[in-house]
């Protein structure tokens, strides 16, 4: 059922078994998982069902360090959350992503890919994807034209993605699941309900209630047995840091880790691939026909990553004739209004296509491609979310972001491109030309327009070492029995693929854990 | 190097590959002219682009800035060069010239071509 909190009397007390804070991809996925249970679930959403400029204002903040998208427009605050801008790309993390790698500082998850596999399968269903199959071999049997490059698979492999039909382009999770959530009798969705404080018991081992407000000037109390923060990696860190009336440094922050290790995916135009001859394949075409839309990128094997001591990353192909006319998204997504930034970005995509058509250049460029490298960022404690002295309209300190990259990030992008370039040349596919800022192996700087994926990860990272993590392997905050974090903030490392599939899988795993605690 | 230099038609590329074997004499070196014709690269570049890359290579490696030294380093019949280029990529015997990841062998071919054209 749906309740517009603005219509509730001031000081209403709302009670349930479980409270999920945030109706984005993680929050909606979890709520759906509880619809057929006997438990009363309170789902709190800061905004309404549509974009609201005043609510979006609550996201204002400052950015420092590597140039980033404005804080006000790099997330969305309404039902469906930032998923309403999601491109729909899904692929599971690789086995190596969960491993401790001695050349990647603070790497190593307390869980493995195998632990997550059953939840990935369930996440596939929530995101309305095809079968939980991500191997090229599987999809080649389904579709005959997915011809891979003849590369040495001990060095380079073809990593498959599926494209979700509940992406932002199609209305997002909000549109896909609004009816299911509203019709579910045990799911109580409160819109215009923004959490402004978390109140614990005296020794801060249990959460007692949440304080909730809205711009209508009303305040509410939410009581539950379990509380799950699902507001995104920036907002979750912000609310934990701001909840400092009982814990001086903020909840779960005894060791000053909350907000640290903020990670993004670098999504950068790194090189041009000039193919010697036409290579007939549908493998690298977005969608690739058929009911399940596919996408493929070139990746480096685990063994070579170990040998070269690099991060995990992949490269995708876009037609150069178009891509050369499309500016970096970091350059065009700078409006504080997310709708305007979105519109500008889309216009730039269309513009690139129009220019390419008008130029109609013939020759080798017809078989030339821009390489977009998608890569994890090494965990970095100095890349972080903090809270500001300035407060938003509801009295919550604003979030600031200092995004910082490292030398390992740059070395890895360069090495991945060199390896793939060498292998494609050896296989007779073509020649690769590196973009200027990757040519000097001693240059560790990053261009101002370095692109990121709007993927916010790592501010409440998972771990067993209390001095370097915020949540345990079940996503429960260390030392607090009934407070959890859902989403990509729990990532220890960020892998190469887009975070959505994994954050849904992790949220469903957390959902099972909370259910088991309730039944016991 | 300008992008227009890579825009070469397939016909031109085939033409370049079918030049009959002749021997070229320069600076005291006699060599098969096919040594100065990188076959694969001619599928994506025109002669001007190959000359540009070759000139850049000779600037980056001044010790190889003569036809005689390049002929000595190539030291092979043109018929085995493709195999050697493949092996270069396999073993990482590559060089970055103007951003291009090239086999050292084919980069030297470009360099040799640039000495011919600059005569």
Image: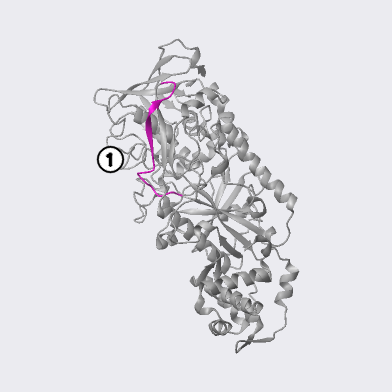
Q: Residue at x 48, y 15 (%)?
A: A216
How crowded pointer 1 is (Cα within 10 Å; few <14, some 14-19, many 20+) is rated as some
Q: Quadrant of the C terminus of chain B?
A: bottom right
Element class at badge 1: loop
Rendered location of residue A203, percent (x, y): 24, 26
Horizontally, residue A198 falls left or right of residue B31, namely: left
| Quadrant (top left/top right/bottom left/bottom right) for the N terminus of chain B | bottom right
On the image, the x and y values in percent for residue A401 come to: 42, 37
Question: Looking at the image, is A47 positioned above or below residue A100?
Answer: above
| The residue positioned farthest toward the top in the image shown | A9
The residue at 66%/77% (across/down) is B117
Name the residue furthest front: B119
Give the residues drawn in magenta, as a range.
Answer: A376-394
Instruction: Answer whether residue A11 is visible to the viewer in this image.
Output: yes
A197 w.r.t. A467: above or below = above
Chain of the residue where label 1 is placed in the rendered structure = A
Question: Which residue position is annotated with label 1?
Answer: A466
């Amino acid at each position: 059922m749906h309740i517009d909190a603005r219509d509730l009397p001031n000081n209403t007390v709302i009670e349930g078994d479980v409270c999920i804070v945030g109706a984005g991809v993680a929050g909606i996925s979890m709520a759906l998982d509880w619809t057929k249970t006997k438990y009363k679930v309170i789902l709190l959403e800061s905004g309404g069902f549509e974009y609201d400029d005043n609510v979006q204002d609550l996201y204002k903040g400052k950015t420092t360090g590597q140039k980033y998208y404005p804080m006000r427009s790099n997330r969305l605050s309404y039902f469906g959350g930032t998923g309403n801008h999601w491109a729909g790309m899904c692929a599971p993390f690789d086995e190596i992503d969960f491993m401790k790698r001695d050349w990647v500082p603070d790497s190593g998850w307390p869980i493995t890919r195998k632990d997550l596999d059953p939840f990935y399968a369930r996440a596939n269903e929530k995101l309305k994807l095809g079968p939980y199959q991500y191997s090229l071999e599987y999809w080649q049997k389904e579709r005959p034209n997915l011809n891979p490059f003849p590369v040495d698979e001990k060095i380079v492999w073809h990593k498959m993605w599926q494209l979700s039909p509940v992406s932002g382009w199609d209305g997002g999770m909000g549109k896909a699941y609004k009816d299911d959530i509203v019709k579910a009798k045990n799911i109580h969705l409160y819109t215009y309900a923004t959490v402004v404080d978390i109140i614990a018991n005296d020794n801060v081992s249990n959460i007692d209630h949440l304080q909730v407000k809205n711009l209508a000037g009303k305040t509410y109390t939410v009581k539950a047995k379990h509380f799950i923060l699902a507001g995104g990696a920036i907002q979750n860190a912000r609310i934990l840091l701001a909840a400092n009336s009982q814990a001086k440094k903020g909840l779960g922050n005894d060791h000053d880790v909350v907000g640290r290790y903020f990670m993004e995916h670098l999504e950068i135009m790194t090189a041009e691939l000039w193919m010697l001859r036409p290579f007939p394949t549908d493998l690298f075409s977005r969608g690739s026909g058929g009911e399940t839309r596919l996408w493929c990128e070139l990746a480096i094997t685990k063994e070579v990553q170990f040998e070269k001591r690099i991060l995990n990353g992949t490269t995708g192909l876009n037609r150069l004739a178009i891509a050369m006319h499309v500016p970096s998204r970091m350059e065009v997504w700078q409006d504080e209004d997310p709708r305007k930034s979105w519109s500008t970005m889309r216009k730039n995509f269309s513009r690139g296509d129009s220019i390419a058509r008008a130029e109609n250049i013939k020759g080798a460029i017809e078989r030339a491609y821009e390489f977009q490298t998608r890569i994890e960022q090494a965990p970095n404690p100095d890349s972080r979310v903090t809270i500001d002295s300035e407060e938003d309209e509801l009295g919550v300190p604003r979030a600031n972001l200092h995004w910082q990259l490292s030398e390992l990030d740059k070395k890895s992008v360069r090495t991945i491109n060199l390896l793939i370039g060498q292998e494609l040349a050896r296989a007779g596919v073509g020649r690769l030309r590196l973009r200027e800022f990757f040519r000097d192996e001693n240059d560790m700087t990053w261009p101002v327009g370095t692109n990121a994926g709007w993927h916010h990860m790592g501010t409440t990272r998972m771990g067993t070492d209390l001095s370097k993590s915020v949540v345990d392997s079940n996503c429960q905050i260390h030392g607090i029995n009934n407070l959890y974090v859902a989403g990509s903030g729990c990532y220890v490392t960020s892998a190469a693929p887009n975070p959505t599939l994994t954050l849904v899988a992790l949220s469903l795993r957390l959902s099972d854990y909370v259910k088991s605690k309730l039944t016991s | 190097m300008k992008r227009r230099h890579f825009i070469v038609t397939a016909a031109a590329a085939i033409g370049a590959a079918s030049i009959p074997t002749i021997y070229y004499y320069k600076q005291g070196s006699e060599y098969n002219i096919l040594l100065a014709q990188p076959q694969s690269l001619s599928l994506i570049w025109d002669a001007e682009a190959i000359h540009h890359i070759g000139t850049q290579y000779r600037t980056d490696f001044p010790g190889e800035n003569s036809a005689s030294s390049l002929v000595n380093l190539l030291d092979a019949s043109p018929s085995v060069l493709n195999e050697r280029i493949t092996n270069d990529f396999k073993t990482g015997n590559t060089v970055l010239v103007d951003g291009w990841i090239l086999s050292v062998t084919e980069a030297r071919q470009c360099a040799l071509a640039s000495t011919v054209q600059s005569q």
